[in-house]
Amino acid sequence: MGAKVLFMNGDFLPFEQGTISVRTHGFAYGTGCFEGIRGYWNAEDQQIYLFRLREHFERLERSCKILQMSLPYTVDEFIEISTELVRRNGQREDVYLRPVIYKSDQIIGVRLHGLKDDCIITSEPLGNYIEITGLRCGVSSWRRIDDNAIPARAKVCGGYVNAALAKSEALQNGFDEAIMLTNEGHVSEGSAENIFLYLDGELVTPAPSENILLGITRDTVIQVAQRELGIPTRERVVDRTELYNADEVFLCGTGAQIAPVIEIDRRPIGTGNVGPIATRLQELYFDIVRGKRAEYRKWCTPVYSLVSAENTD
């Protein structure tokens, strides 16, 4: 079911009323922060589970500190608002929540301080953001934004122009996705995904210093790979040519989920097919996010009570 309502500045409103002025500071200058949160429908439980909801709002809080923004609600209040929003939409499918905190003053002039911060949260149906059965990627000519320019560790609205440049270049060159390098020429991440390599029996992923978003799915992969597969993860500098020699490569993120890569710069990765490590992690991930693994239920926030789940038709 599509979105009927959204949450905006303290109220649940009809979706079509979720508008801002063309003079809004966040629109004109990109002065906002956002999150992307997935909810997964479990038909057997008649339940939507919002995955790692608390961690997403904690990261939003950290992003806002960097942009001198104040969250209008506590993390616990955001959790309550989010679950209520999905309930009001009566959604019984996979959904995507996008909370946005933005500078709402209608002024001309670039700054962060002394401006009003407002909030919008939407909940909409969403399937796969990118292909999850074998991506063909290209290393982008666009370099990843630097921590001293627009910090990539914060989900800053304006910073995603950097991702858009790389993504369009990749698609227009015949690839599915881009892989971005730092200004030093080290591997950073995809256009909007973290990246993992499987090399010599361990997972390798760029360190936080490599201008990456500290991904919640990235953290999930690190924990699950160690716990379920006994595979450690090494966070370090990764050179471009290591991509070509990896046994496996995959991207991950809330939108991307776990997306195996089978080719980079026209070079096959490993056997040129989706590898066993990415396959197993993908299977585990989808079981976990749909609430099918009891030991990971702490990461899954249920939307419906048993009674309300039965009466949402």
Image: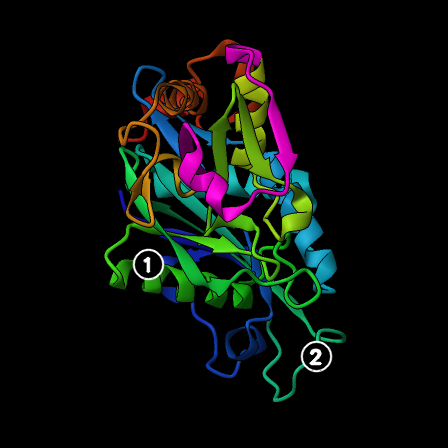
The residue lying at 42 percent from left, 18 percent from top is 284
Q: In the image, what residue occupies the spot 34% across and 35% down?
A: 269
Q: Is residue 74 visible?
A: yes
Label 1 amino acid?
A: Ala
Q: Residue furthest left?
A: 174
Secondary structure of residue under mark 1? helix
Between residue 42 and residue 293, name the one nearer to us.
293
Q: Is 245 on the left or on the right of 238, as rendered?
A: left
Q: Nearer the viewer, residue 300 or 173?
A: 173
| 223 left or right, relative to 6 | right
Q: Quadrant of the N terminus?
A: top left
Amino acid under disc 2: Arg
Local secondary structure at mark 2: loop
Mark 2 and mark 1: span between their CA atoms? 33 Å
User: Is residue 104 within the magenta segment?
Assistant: no
Q: Specify which label sits upstream in the sequence, 2 or 1.
A: 2
> Is-magenta flag for residue 249?
yes
Instruction: Name the mark on residue 111.
Output: 2
Q: Magenta segment range?
A: 227-254
Estimate the x, y position of residue 94 in percent, counting from the top left: 33, 35
Vertically, is 249 above or below 176?
Answer: above
Q: Which residue is mark 1?
A: 170
* Residue 308 vertical position relative to residue 295 in the rendered view, above or below: below
Vertical side of 234 occupied by 236: above or below: below
User: Where does the image place residue 13, in percent across and percent down from the top left?
Assistant: 44, 57
- With respect to residue 182, does 103 lie above or below? below
Q: Quadrant of the C terminus?
A: top left
